[in-house]
Image: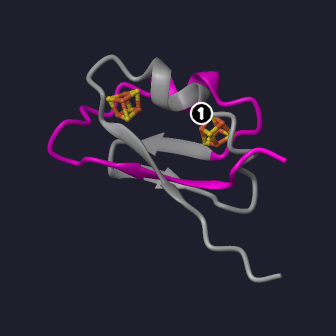
């Protein structure tokens, strides 16, 4: 099973283009004029959003999963 991740946004870099939200297969990211939002329960840790961001504003952190 691939490592589960939490997606983190660097708010200084993100210009709210919505690109990451557009490529996320499970709609785990929402981008509004008011900000960037991540929904951990929907994320499947595919990392597509991280490669898709044109300014490298997204990064992954290992998600601690309690067994
Ligand atoms: S890692 Fe994949 S599922 Fe999770 S927010 Fe990014 S694109 Fe969506
Ligand atoms: S693709 Fe990057 S710059 Fe665009 S909304 Fe997502 S995190 Fe922000």
Q: How is the image coloured?
A: one colour
| As drawn, 53 above or below 27 | above
Q: Residue at x 33, y 51 (%)?
A: 34
Q: Is 33 left or right of 50, judged from the image as shown?
A: left
Which corner quadrant of the figure contains ligand 1?
top right
Local crowd size for mark 1, using a 10 Å CA cut-off: few (<14), some (14–19), many (≥20) = some
Foreground: 55 or 15?
55
Q: Residue at x 14, y 44 (%)?
A: 12
Q: Residue at x 26, y 47 (%)?
A: 10
Q: Circle 1 is placed at which residue position? A: 47
Across and down, in percent, residue 45 comes to 68, 44
Q: How many discs mark residues in the rendered view? A: 1
Foreground: 30 or 49?
49
Q: Secondary structure at mark 1?
A: loop
| As drawn, 34 above or below 67 | above
Across and down, in percent, residue 2 comes to 76, 44
Foreground: 47 or 53?
47
Across and down, in percent, residue 50 comes to 47, 31
Q: Is mark 1 within 8 Å of ligand 1?
A: yes
Is 13 magenta? The answer is: yes
Which SS type dominates the magenta stretch?
loop
Is 16 magenta? The answer is: yes
Residue 32's quadrant in the figure? top left
| As drawn, 11 above or below 20 | below
Residue most toward the left? 12
Q: Is 31 left or right of 30, judged from the image as shown?
A: left
Region rendered in magenta = 1-28
Across and down, in percent, residue 40 comes to 65, 61
Q: Residue at x 63, y 58 (%)?
A: 39
């Amino acid at each position: 099973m691939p490592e589960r991740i939490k997606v983190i946004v660097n708010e200084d870099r993100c210009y709210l283009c919505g690109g990451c939200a557009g490529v996320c297969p499970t709609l785990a990211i929402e981008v509004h004029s008011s900000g960037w939002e991540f929904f951990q329960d929907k994320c499947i840790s595919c990392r597509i959003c991280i490669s898709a961001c044109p300014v490298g504003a997204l990064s992954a952190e290992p998600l601690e999963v309690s067994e």
